[in-house]
Image (tube, rainbow, N blue to C red):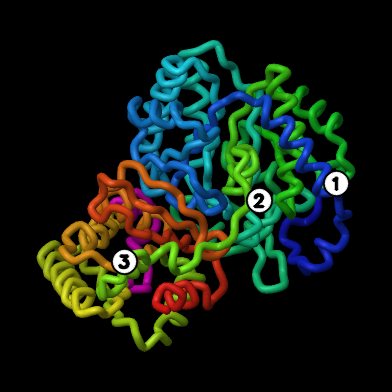
Amino acid sequence: MNTKKSTDVRAADEVFEKVPSVDRKVVTEMLKDELAGLNKKIIVLDDDPTGVQTVHNISVYTDWSVDSMGQGFAEQNAMFFILTNSRGFTAAETEKAHKEIAENALEAAKKHGKDFLIISRGDSTLRGHYPLETEVLKETIEGASDIQFDGEVIVPFFKEGGRFTVDNIHYVQQEDQLVPAGETEFAKDRTFGYTKSHLGEWAEEKSNGRFKAKNAVYISLESLRALEIDKIAGQLLEVKDFNKVIVNAIDYVDIEIFAIALIRALKAGKHFMFRSAAALTKVIGGVSDRGLLAREELVKEESGNGGLIIVGSHVKKTTEQLEELKKCSFIEFIEFNVHLVVDPVQFKAEKERVIEACEDLIRSGKTVAVYTRRERMDLGEGKKEEELLLSVKISDAVTSIVQTLKVRPSYIVAKGGITSSDIGTKGLKVKRATVAGQIMPGIPVWFTGEESKFPGISYIIFPGNVGTKTALKETVEMLEQ
């Protein structure tokens, strides 16, 4: 186990230059052969809608009913996504949902006579209900089938967002530096905080010591780049007792090499649970590369109506991007004072003010950006659950902007995971969407289904923690060309 001091900030170029290159063509062919024989449906549980940020032409279902699961199993695609939105849930709600998901997946799999893999897609900066989600899935599936999970694969690598794992330490790239995840603002999250950047130690911390860093299996960059596939498969075959498998990666090729060894271990009868960011899903789902979406693919009807941008996330990056967006003179900005949530009468009046302004402006051809007040609401120590419940009320109010809108915007952009999930499911009433692709690296677009409030509209899901300072501004400028 590597014991490099996890607080070390490293120069990105120096780290990347030390990693040997590998013949990508050889890897691609090997992976293609292994995927052809996998023959398992891949179910990705997405704790907010941003997990589709690496894929295209893939279905997203916004509920986990047996019917929706069955539709996913019936598709020709090897993979489908279920949007759980569990990052906005309490622990009790998360446990209930994941028990239902596991039971329904087993039922759908039985009906369709097909094996499956479940990937729990979580945040690339390590926030979310972990290990609760994967442990509930494990226990439920094991209790209702003959499947016994040998281990859990942890892969938070996400190149498009600048998230890399090197020497078992997970890093967030900031400008030209790699900052250990435990030293970033994400680690200080009031609900999902942590202190460790070494992923074995992180899993030990999050499991309250039940899984030890020393018992984890570490897949090194050196081994991956040397194409030691038999060795890596051998490491996976030795995993037992639901111990953790930590995968180092700085590029997609590392995930591809790992996937070759992984599939061989799966074919040999091993069972794994997965906690990953978005990169693994693209690779294991066999999703091809495609270019970024163009404006003509996204704005199909020139209605003359303005677009709608809703900014809910409070991470530093979002606030910086909002400040850049404010330089756009063609946008009307409306601040939504969500701190009034503690006074129901005032909050209702504030919500009605925002909705009325949006309606009038969009109808007149103006693009509107609604943003929640930037200061975080802080109820004090020991109030995590209360804060989460208030944040749900705020999200419901933000969602109601789309819910009550009578005029169809030319497009909708939602900034932040929980915000975009609620707008998609409650505001737009999407049951099934198709992931069109990405408008910028790591920024996905849904085409909404026929059942939705605005069928076929381009819904741009902009993660709170992704993109340069100018990425949001550049995205909207492209849509407005």
**In the rendered image, the vertical position of residue 156 relative to residue 461, given as above or below:** above
Asked whether, in this view, residue 361 is left or right of residue 283, the answer is left
**Residue at numbered disc 2:** 157
At label 3, which amino acid type do we have? Glu
* Residue picked out by circle 1: 225
The residue singled out by tag 3 in the image is 301
N-term-proximal mark, 2 vs 1: 2
* Residue type, mark 2 in image: Phe
Q: Quadrant of residue 420?
A: bottom left
Residue 172 spot, x, y in % from top left: 65, 61
Relative placement, left or right, of 156 versus 79 is right
Q: Which residues are magenta?
A: 371-389
Q: Is residue 361 in the magenta section? A: no
Name the kind of residue labelled 1 in the image.
Arg
- Residue 441, quarter of picture: bottom right
189 is higher (above) or lower (below) than 307: above
Please tell me how crowded label 1 is: few (under 14), some (14-19), or many (20+) other residues with Cα within 10 Å.
Answer: some
Choose the circle earlier in sequence order: 1 or 3.
1
